[in-house]
Amino acid sequence: MEQEMINEIKQSIISMEDAVERLKKELSKIRTGKASPSMISDILVDYYGTMTPLSQVANVSTPDSKTLSIQPWEKSMLGPIEKAIFEANMGLTPMNNGELVMITIPPLTEDRRKQMAKQGKALGEDAKVSFRTARQKAMSAVKKAVKDGFPEDMGKDKEAEIQKTISGFSNKVDELVAAKEKDILTV
């Protein structure tokens, strides 16, 4: 019974760590007006009939803060890469010069910046919802263990420990979202 509780608490912590990592990945995809290879990393390109991530068919770099440069491993991939970027509907216009694909990142309007900041906050809220779910599972495991004979005062200590862990993860999410929001709203 005690081991089940410990395992459930460990699982809850792992799911919270996963939620933070997922949040970091999702926040990196939000445009800030600056070029970043992660903006287009999830675009799938038709590579000889197989949908393949862009990063596996080309080298993506940022020659400056407003430009993405995509150097395909094979020149025959220029067209499919260009097509995939258009189809991703991200508001980006690729330019193919026969050697590589260049994308100039347009400046964001004030409304678009606010919209993206809201999107970042929503992602942070999603992470916090998963924390609450994890907390509920961990607290239920503690209550069950107490009901099955685990000392009640130790159960209260475990609950306080769980709450402290949740608060730490929640603060981490707030920091990530605030940093992204500052990045987005900075012109």
Image (tube, rainbow, N blue to C red):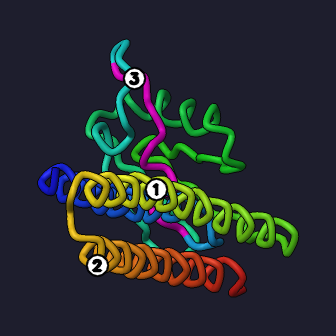
The C terminus lies in quadrant = bottom right
- Counting labels gives 3
- Give the residues drawn in magenta, as a range: 35-47
Query: Label 3 belongs to which residue?
Result: 51
Q: At numbered mark 3, what does the secondary structure look like: helix, strand or loop? A: strand
Q: Which residue is mark 2?
A: 153
Give the label, 1 or 3, closer to the camera. 1
CA gap between label 1 and label 3 equals 39 Å
Give x and y (percent) for residue 160: 37, 80
Task: Give the residue at x 58% y 73%.
Answer: 34
Image quadrant where residue 2 sits: bottom left
What residue sits right under mark 1 in the picture?
136
Q: Residue at x 18, y 59 (%)?
A: 6
> The disc labelled 2 sits on which kind of residue?
Asp
Residue name at image x 53 percent, y 68 percent: 35
The kind of residue tagged 1 is Gln
